Image: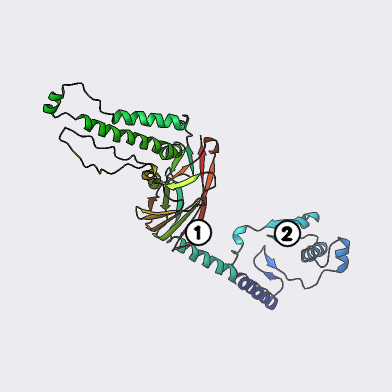
Amino acid sequence: DKISDRAKTVLKFIERILNESNPLIINDQISIEIIYSKPLIQTFENYQLNYYEKDHRLLVSMLEYQRENPEAIIYLCSADIGPRISAKRFNIQTINLDDKYKLPEESTEEQKLIKKLQKENNQLKSIMPKLDLKFSNYTELIKLCIPQKNIKTIDEFTDRRMYRLKSCTPLIQKSNQNPIFALTSLTLSSDQIDSYNTKLLTYYEVCEQHCREVAYDYYQKKSLSFNLYFLLTNEGTSPADAIDIQLIFPDGFSIRDNKSFQAEEPKLPEPPRKPKSRIDFFPNNESELKPSSLFNNLISDDSTTTQNSQTITITNNNCVNYYLKVLKHSFNSELVPVTIYYNNVSEIKNFHISFKITANNTPIPIEGKLNVVFE
């Protein structure tokens, strides 16, 4: 190495001094003299120095030389702070070498290998995808507002729905017009009105049962539901392939993907067809209305759907899994939103979502947390 080479050069120079003359005159003010004698043990004892310390040997040599040459001005020239401090104890002047004369430290073979591997690793990182998951506001935190309005009771909810339904689909009132005129004007007959009103009253009963047994349950869910929108980002320099995203939610609420949650909203059956005139007949075997089995459109706790080239699976242990085939570099992808809903306002509290992202061309999973805060 460089230090070894420099040491060899200095030793050759010292050998040349020995072969030519000692001392070697460099110029009028500089000469180099090699002292062959070793310092005496007694000198170490006199100055309370340790013979086995190399720095002390150097100091004792200088002290003996100064004693033999009292007219000489002696300096200790060293980049090592230890000998310089010891020299001051004996009033020996010191010169500190500037760092610019130092040779740069050389790396060992192991250090060279580490640097090489680090460089290769950085090169690989520079051509890899860099995936991350955030909310749609590009942060790891989202704030949601707790509904302030009171949730209606089942009777309030049913009465309100039935009032609107009966207002939109009222019973037909019989008129007191002359029967002969009624025949000529093609107005509805008394039998038609009675038949229609009977079916409509049955329709009212079925819809009320629907409101109490099915619709109110969904109304409660929707009143205490919140939508979460996620954004997958790739800030790397290459596309990510076969991306799996796992989101783990805490207990305390239920989860649906947003589209499925909206599809759960129960639909009312079609009301009976209203005759338009006396000659407007329809078959007597018109499909019969049935109660709540027509409206129970709920999906199971475990569901898998495919939307916007994404596959989303929600398990009954509050785990949501997404799968995407590819995400180009410098692109973002909005994930299928999910809806969470509570059974009671008192159960609503802040929580965090743990996530893990893996892809075919990312050697290490990306893990993190997203925080949901209620206000």
Q: Nearer the viewer, residue 336 or 291?
A: 291
Residue kind at label 2, given as amino acid type: Tyr
Instruction: State whether residue 205 is above or below residue 72.
Output: above
Residue kind at label 1, given as amino acid type: Pro
Number of the label disc, if any, that sits on residue 75 = 2
Q: Residue placed at 36% from the left, 31% from the top?
A: 162
Structural distance between the alpha carbons of marks 2 and 1: 62 Å
Q: Residues within 10 Å of mark 1 (few under 14, many from 20)?
A: some
Place residue 136 in its image quadrant: top left
Q: Mark 2 near mark 1, Cβ–Cβ under 8 Å?
A: no
Q: Give the image location of residue 122, x and y in percent.
A: 48, 62
Q: Give the image location of residue 320, x and y in percent.
A: 47, 52
Image quadrant holding the N terminus, namely: bottom right
Q: Nearer the viewer, residue 144 or 175?
A: 175
Q: Residue placed at 68% from the left, 73% from the top?
A: 14
Q: Give the image location of residue 78, x and y in percent.
A: 69, 60
Q: Nearer the viewer, residue 103 or 266?
A: 266
Helix, strand or loop status at disc 2? strand
Number of the label disc, if any, that sits on residue 291 = none
Q: Which residue is mark 1?
A: 365
Q: Give the image location of residue 161, x and y in percent.
A: 37, 31
Going by the image, does 278 lie left or right of 60?
left
Q: Is residue 40 visible in this depiction of the protein?
A: yes
Q: Is residue 222 visible in this depiction of the protein?
A: no
2 vs 1, front mark: 1
Q: Residue placed at 26% from the left, 34% from the top?
A: 195
Helix, strand or loop status at disc 1? strand
Going by the image, does 321 lie left or right of 90?
left
Q: Nearer the viewer, residue 105 or 61?
A: 105
